[in-house]
Amino acid sequence: MTPQDHAQIDAWRSSGETIVFTNGVFDILHAGHVTYLQAARALGDRLVVGLNSDVSVRMLGKGPERPINQQDDRKTVLEALQAVDAVIVFEAETPAGLIASVCPDVLVKGGDYTPDAQAGEEGYIVGSEEVRKRGGHVAVIPLLPGRSTTNIIKKSRSH
């Protein structure tokens, strides 16, 4: 997180705004991503998106061809969305360090996660314990059925 990112988030917080945080790859942006980000933004005043770097995406094992779009392109597209107030690229396998830096009031993940899962369990939300300890809360937003980057890639290869 740059000093400018930190200063902007501190300014929002100082003026009483609720900071919402989510993260992801957002490789081939689709309706599922957009509705998810709009719903996340509706949970507070400002939406900060942690964007997996290209190196981070490869750590996640999404496949040798991923990401399809480079991180600077993915960041540019996300920043153009009305629902998104800031995009911060992170290099690690998980956003734990970034979440600790942002200190969001609300931590959001998609419906394939479980808000009460513990570390090591399927569906665990990285950073959830820390956010709750600071008095924040964790929200899970249902996914738009049938929308995924993986499905888009499979469909494009079948044509």
Image: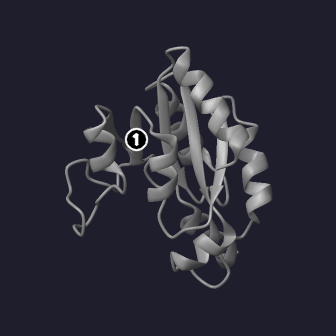
- In the rendered view, how is the structure colored? one colour
Q: Secondary structure at mark 1?
A: strand
The residue carrying mark 1 is: 107
Tell me where residue 121 appears, x and y as whole percent: 22, 67
Q: Is residue 85 visible?
A: no
Q: How many marks?
A: 1
Residue furthest to the top: 15
- Kind of residue sitting beneath label 1: Leu
From the viewer's side, name the closer residue of 5 and 115: 5
Tell me where residue 9 appears, x and y as whole percent: 60, 31
Tell me where residue 118 appears, x and y as whole percent: 20, 59
Q: Is residue 134 visible?
A: yes
Q: Residue at x 60, y 78 (%)?
A: 58
Residue 37, located in which quarter of the rendered image?
top right
Q: Residue at x 73, y 51 (%)?
A: 75
Q: Is residue 5 left or right of residue 92?
A: right
Tell me where residue 54 appears, x and y as whole percent: 68, 70
> Is 94 above or below relative to 22?
below
Q: Residue at x 52, y 52 (%)?
A: 98
